[in-house]
Image (tube, rainbow, N blue to C red):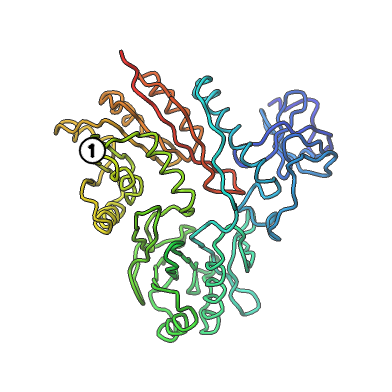
Amino acid sequence: MNKHPDIRKNEYYDVYVEDLTHDGKGVAKIDGYPLFIAGVLPGEKAKIQATKLNKGYGFGRLVELQEKSEFRVAPACPIYEECGGCQLQHMKYQGQLLAKEKQVREAMQRIGKLDSVPVHPVLGMDDPWRYRNKAQVPIGEREGGLVGGFYKQRTHDIIDMEACLIQQEENDVVLQKIKAICSQFGLRAYNEKTHKGTLRHIMVRSGKATGDIMVVLITRTSDIPNRKKLVEAIVDALPEVKSIVQNINPKRTNVIFGEQTNVIWGDEFIYDYIGHIKFAISARSFYQVNPAQTKVLYEKALEYAQLTGKETVIDAYCGIGTISLFLAQKAKKVYGVEIVPEAIEDAKRNAELNGISNVKFAVGEAERVIPKWYEEGVRADTLVVDPPRKGCDESLLRTIIDMKPEKVVYVSCNPATLARDLRILTDGGYATVQVQPVDMFPHTTHVELVALMSRVDE
């Protein structure tokens, strides 16, 4: 296996960093052989050590920066390098937005062969900190007390964390108090090796617009020692808490949630708003973690749909109805489909909560339900998709091509699968009009997108 005859493991090399990977590593090439290096930025010169060499690519370790990028900054977070939750804190925010735009353009060109499609500059945040409305931390023990934070990169060692600069501040405050109260009442942390102990994770959800807080204790056992006193202490210390929930996960697994969820105090839901639309959020609801940028994303999707009040719209992968309810404000009728039954229950509840009656939600696979609607006479003028990272199921793309809606609005969290699917729709008679990236997760490598496609007259 010829890795590269001129590069040897553990040797040192001077390199120029050309690009960033989708997970934030710098890319440098030695005689055309790419090396991926954490902690370096495009435009930088560095001394690196080659640490691992594969057939077509290798990895390196930064030894010394010789020339810095104009976008380099000192990370604001003290545990940034250990944690790995963010990948781009060492890059100025303006540089992050440019890097994400480049990533989207390259995916369109390389994967979608869509060289002429307009990709707009990324819509970023005025203040790209403290945006996450959900904190979810594993719990461990150290010197008799509970610790909670994030796993150190590539380990299951928990880094105790007092503040996370991308979490809403109130979530940090609540987490610290919950940890202290659980320690006070003798709750033992779950131990992965021995499969003993009670408390596995603590999750805190907050409604940015309402101030509502939900605390979720994820435990190995159904019994919580001193539960009554523990709950009283939480309620007494944190009057903004509206709901305390226990999720029970008795399995040997690194999956966070178990199947059983019980409200042990207060309400089943907390509430939040995206724009004018109110959402009920339970412990297990999927709800976007950055509501400010979700509003930006959905308003762009609504703008691209160009609804006049006469259209029938289908929302494939509708989740808890977030996009459907935005579209329903301007459409004649919206049909939403989602494979997760609990999400559809949430969607119906959210429609009722907002007095929106021109929506219909169904449980099932989009690629099965939408053809059934078509057989029943439903004709979509506009079809909206917001699939998971793997993109649309191929049979759904075929269904779209067969149904021939005038417009397709494609919301995506993965430039690569978006570009792939746009290519399939292009070959099936659509033209991509424009692509708008939105920065939902500052300081990470993730980027959300919304693309507008229109039917080409045959």
Q: Residue furthest left?
A: 376
Res. 232 in view:
yes
Q: Where 286 falls versus 17 (above or below)?
A: below
Image height of 32 relative to 336, above or below: above
> Can you name the residue that lies furthest to the top here?
458
Amino acid type, mark 1 = Val
Quadrant location of the N terminus?
A: top right
The residue at the point 75 percent across, 26 percent down is 4
Q: Nearer the viewer, residue 224 or 163?
A: 163
Residue 147 spot, x, y in % from top left:
60, 71
Residue 457's place in the image compared with 171, above or below, is above
109 displayed left or right of 261:
right
Q: Which residue is mark 1?
A: 369
In the image: residue 147, left or right of residue 452: right
* Apparent side of residue 209 relative to residue 147 in the rendered image (left or right): left
Vertical placement of residue 359 versus 183, above or below: above
> What count of labels does the image hold?
1
Left of 431 or right of it: where is 191?
right
Determine whether the residue tagged by mark 1 lies in a helix, strand or loop: helix
* Residue at 51%, 84% in the rendered image: 185
Q: Classify mark 1: residues with Cα within 10 Å, few (<14), some (14-19) or many (20+).
A: some
Q: Nearer the viewer, residue 134 or 183?
A: 134
Residue 318 in percent (x, y) is at 32, 45
Whole-percent x, y for residue 415 in the image: 51, 34
Looking at this view, is 36 or 354 the one in front?
354
Location of the C terminus by quadrant is top left
Q: How far from the left and from the top, in percent, is residue 48?
A: 80, 39
Q: Is residue 216 visible?
A: no
